[in-house]
Image: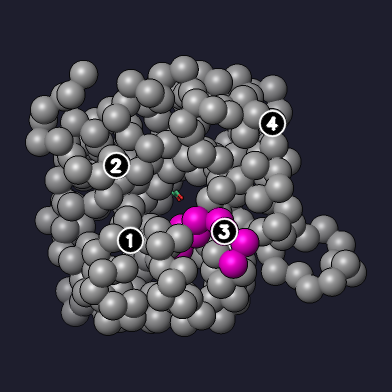
Amino acid sequence: MKKPLIVANWKLYVTDLESAVISAKAVARAAGKTGADLVICPPTPFISNVAKAVGGKGIAVGAQASSVAEGEKHTGETTAEMLRSAGASYVIVGHSERRAEGEDGEKIAVLLEDAVAHKLVSILCIGEKMRDQGGEHFAVLETQLRDGLSRLSSKDAKRLVVAYEPVWAIGKSAADAMDTRALEETILYIRKVLAELLGRAPALSAPILYGGSVEPANAQELMSAGVSGFLVGHASVEPSSLIAIAKASFTKSNNGTKKR
Ligand code: 13P
């Protein structure tokens, strides 16, 4: 059984280096007892220190975004190469909060291609802004997958994680997260599209995470929809909450049998 993958997207919730390092160390102390693989994505300036704080403790560090820039004359950009050198091994690509600022399908495809070329595991975020009875949201997801993966070679698919984050469910509370049955249906749909785009084997092995108001209270229930883990925003900032989500995910993925 593969371990659940729990990715903490700290967004801009953590605004100073000292707090970032203290939280990362607290997560690192408890991570080994969760049964899950953990990734912390702090704000970019904290990546290097967070990587040192969790180094060797089985937690990976990721970036919330990267840029693609050829040559030196691009003031203010942070490339995948730099992120890797600072200690990141993951990167989030195409988060809805960045799509809202203008990242489109073509740009996301280029970012993903570049990130995997620099050996970063790339977490491609997809998700509809709203749902309707007519099922329009499935077409939105298919387009986002087709566009985002258009430059990914099948040999690089091993560095792909897909995060399904319905925009309407982000930043709320456990009661507002997605219904488990609807989530299960959506995960099956995403796997089907992945199989069409990448072939069966990569589609089956790519982890598919859910993100959108995951909290300790609903993590176990949401895992039963067949997700591989979670991309967690607000509830990932408090170390005890992140650890509780990781433990609940592990418990569910092992049918309630805690192997500890
Ligand atoms: P919340 O967990 O705060 O809903 O955020 C989800 C998210 O956007 C993670 O990338």
Tell which tag, 1 or 3, sits nearer the viewer. 3
Amino acid type at circle 4 is Asn
Of helix, strand and loop, which one carries label 4? Answer: helix
Say few, some or many: other residues with alpha carbon within 10 Å of mark 3 (under 14 / 14 to 19 / 20 or more). Answer: some
Amino acid type at circle 1 is Ala
Query: In the shown orientation, is residue 82 left or right of residue 114?
Result: right
Determine which residue is flagged by label 2.
4
Mark 4–mark 2 Cα distance, whole angstroms, equals 25 Å
Tell which tag, 3 or 4, sits nearer the viewer. 3
Tell which tag, 2 or 3, sits nearer the viewer. 3
Residue at x-position 37% and y-position 65%: 127
Residue 206's label in the rendered image is: 1
Looking at this view, name the residue that lies furthest to the front. Answer: 155
Residue 49's label in the rendered image is: 4
Q: Does ligand 1 reach within 8 Å of label 1's beta carbon?
A: no
Mark 1–mark 3 Cα distance, whole angstroms, equals 16 Å
Say few, some or many: other residues with alpha carbon within 10 Å of mark 4 (under 14 / 14 to 19 / 20 or more). Answer: some
Residue at x-position 41% and y-position 75%: 154
**Quadrant location of residue 14?**
top right
Q: Choose the circle earlier in sequence order: 3 or 4.
A: 4
